[in-house]
Image (cartoon, rainbow, N blue to C red):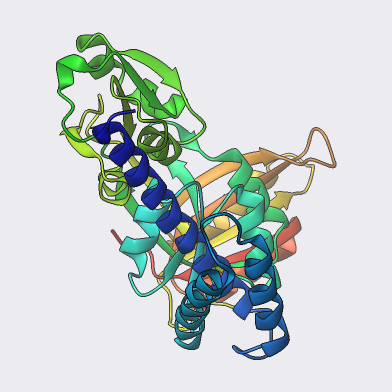
C-alpha cells in the first residue's frame, strides 16, 4: 500500500471510531431512562477493568483507561442534560429523522431498526417520543404503522408533513459520468426511475436510503452513488451530485408523533379507530354523525382485523379539538354505535 492508500484507511477508521462513539452516547442516553443516577461507580469500575484487559499490542492499558475516562465523563455530561429522546426507524439521515428534526430540533433523534421497536421503547419509557410515517402521497398508507396504532396504548401528540426530495450522493471528488451503480430503498429507486434511466445507472435495492448512503464511505465504492436525503450528505461526508431527482415534485410523507401521555396543549385535529356493527347502513350511520355535526374528515381508511377475518377497523382523522362540546358529543354517539372504539389522540395538525 502506498501513502495515499494508508491515509485512506486511517480516514475510514477515524470515521468508524466517531460513528461508534456517537452510537455509544445514544445508548447511554437510553440507559439513563432506566437507572436512578447518572453516576454508577460499580459499573464504571467494570468498564475500566474491561478496556484495560482489551488493550494489547500497541495500546497500553493506561492509555485505554485515560481514553475511556474521557469518554465516560462526556457521557455523564450528556446524560446530565436530561435531553428528550425521539425514536425513528432507519439509519441516521433517514427521512424519518429529517421529520423528527423539523418537528422539534431540541429532541435527540434515536435510530431504531423496526417500527415495533419504536412503539415498544416509547411504551417502556426508554424513549420520550416516537415518530412514524402513516401515509405517503404517492405510495399510500404505511400498513404496519397503522396496524400498530390500533393495538398500541400510545397516544398521537403531533404530526408533521414533509416533502420528500431525493438527492444523488457520492464520494467526494466523484463525477456524475463516473457512476455506474446507484443504491437505495426500492421505493426511492422507483420514485427516481426517470433520472436513473436517463443517466444509465444500474439500480441496486438496499434496505434503507440512509443505509445506502452510510455504506458508501465504509465500502469506498468510487463508481457507485446512493439516493437519499441531503442530511445524509452532511452526516456521511458525501457530495450532493444532483438534488430533487424524484419524478414527482408532489412526493410528501405525513408522520405522527407518539407519546405515553396525551398532548400538553389543546389540539386542532383528532384521530380515532373503530369497528362498526355487522348490519346494513352501519358505516353510513357512523359517518353521518360527523357530517351532521359539520366535522371535516381529513382521512378515512380501513384495515382488516387480524384476529377476526372478514371484519375491518376504520381509521379516521378529523379537524377539531376533543375539548369542544360538538366533538365530545359526536364521539359519544360514535362510541355507542361502534362495536370497538379507540381514541388515538388530539394534537396540533398541519405542521410542515
The quadrant the C terminus occupies is bottom left
Q: Residue 288, percent across and down?
A: 55, 53
| Foreground pick, 1 / 204 | 1
* Tally of numbered tags: 0
Left or right placement of residue 175 versus residue 25 in this view: left
| Foreground pick, 232 / 289 | 232
Which image quadrant is residue 304 in? top right
| Foreground pick, 180 / 316 | 180
Residue 277 appears anywhere in the view? yes
180 over 227 or under it: above or below: above
| Foreground pick, 202 / 239 | 239
The quadrant the N terminus occupies is top left
Left or right placement of residue 42 versus residue 324 in this view: right
Q: Residue at x 46, y 78 (%)?
A: 70
Q: Residue 161, percent across and down?
A: 34, 53
Q: Residue at x 63, y 67 (%)?
A: 51
162 over 186 or under it: above or below: below
Q: Residue 96, percent across and down?
A: 42, 51
Q: Residue 108, percent across and down?
A: 43, 69
Left or right placement of residue 116 versus residue 94 in this view: right
Q: Residue at x 32, y 45 (%)?
A: 11
Residue 292 appears anywhere in the view? no
Amino acid at each position: 500500500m502506498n501513502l495515499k492508500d494508508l491515509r485512506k484507511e486511517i480516514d475510514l477508521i477515524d470515521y468508524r471510531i466517531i460513528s461508534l462513539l456517537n452510537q455509544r452516547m445514544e445508548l447511554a442516553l437510553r440507559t439513563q431512562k432506566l437507572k436512578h443516577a447518572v453516576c454508577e461507580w460499580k459499573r464504571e469500575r467494570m468498564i475500566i477493568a474491561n478496556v484495560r484487559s482489551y488493550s494489547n499490542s500497541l495500546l497500553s492499558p493506561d492509555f485505554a483507561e485515560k481514553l475511556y475516562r474521557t469518554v465516560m465523563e462526556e457521557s455523564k455530561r450528556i446524560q446530565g442534560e436530561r435531553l428528550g429522546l425521539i425514536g425513528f426507524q432507519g439509519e441516521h439521515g433517514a427521512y424519518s429523522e429529517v421529520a423528527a428534526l423539523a418537528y422539534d430540533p431540541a429532541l435527540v433523534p434515536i435510530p431504531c431498526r423496526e417500527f415495533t421497536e419504536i412503539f415498544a421503547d416509547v411504551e417502556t419509557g426508554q424513549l420520550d417520543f416516537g415518530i412514524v410515517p402513516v401515509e405517503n402521497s404517492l405510495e399510500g398508507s404505511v400498513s404496519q404503522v397503522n396496524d400498530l396504532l390500533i393495538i398500541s396504548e400510545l397516544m398521537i401528540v403531533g404530526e408533521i408533513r414533509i416533502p420528500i426530495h431525493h438527492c444523488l450522493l457520492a464520494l467526494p471528488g466523484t463525477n456524475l459520468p463516473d457512476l455506474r451503480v446507484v443504491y437505495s430503498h426500492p421505493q426511492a429507486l422507483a420514485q427516481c426511475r426517470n433520472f436513473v434511466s436517463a443517466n444509465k445507472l444500474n439500480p441496486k435495492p438496499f434496505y434503507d436510503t440512509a443505509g445506502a448512503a452510510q455504506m458508501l464511505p465504509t465500502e469506498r465504492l468510487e463508481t457507485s452513488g446512493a439516493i437519499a436525503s441531503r442530511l445524509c450528505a452532511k452526516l456521511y461526508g458525501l457530495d450532493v451530485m444532483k438534488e430533487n431527482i424524484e419524478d414527482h415534485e408532489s412526493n410528501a410523507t405525513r408522520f405522527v408523533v407518539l407519546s405515553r401521555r396525551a398532548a400538553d396543549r389543546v389540539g386542532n385535529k383528532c384521530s380515532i379507530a373503530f369497528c362498526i356493527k355487522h348490519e346494513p347502513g352501519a358505516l353510513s350511520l357512523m359517518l353521518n354523525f360527523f357530517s351532521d355535526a359539520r366535522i371535516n374528515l381529513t382521512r378515512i381508511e380501513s384495515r382488516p382485523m387480524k384476529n377476526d377475518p372478514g371484519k375491518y377497523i376504520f381509521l379516521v382523522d378529523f379537524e377539531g379539538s376533543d375539548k369542544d362540546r360538538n366533538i365530545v358529543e359526536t364521539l359519544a354517539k360514535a362510541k355507542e354505535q361502534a362495536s370497538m372504539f379507540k381514541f388515538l389522540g388530539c394534537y396540533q395538525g398541519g405542521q410542515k
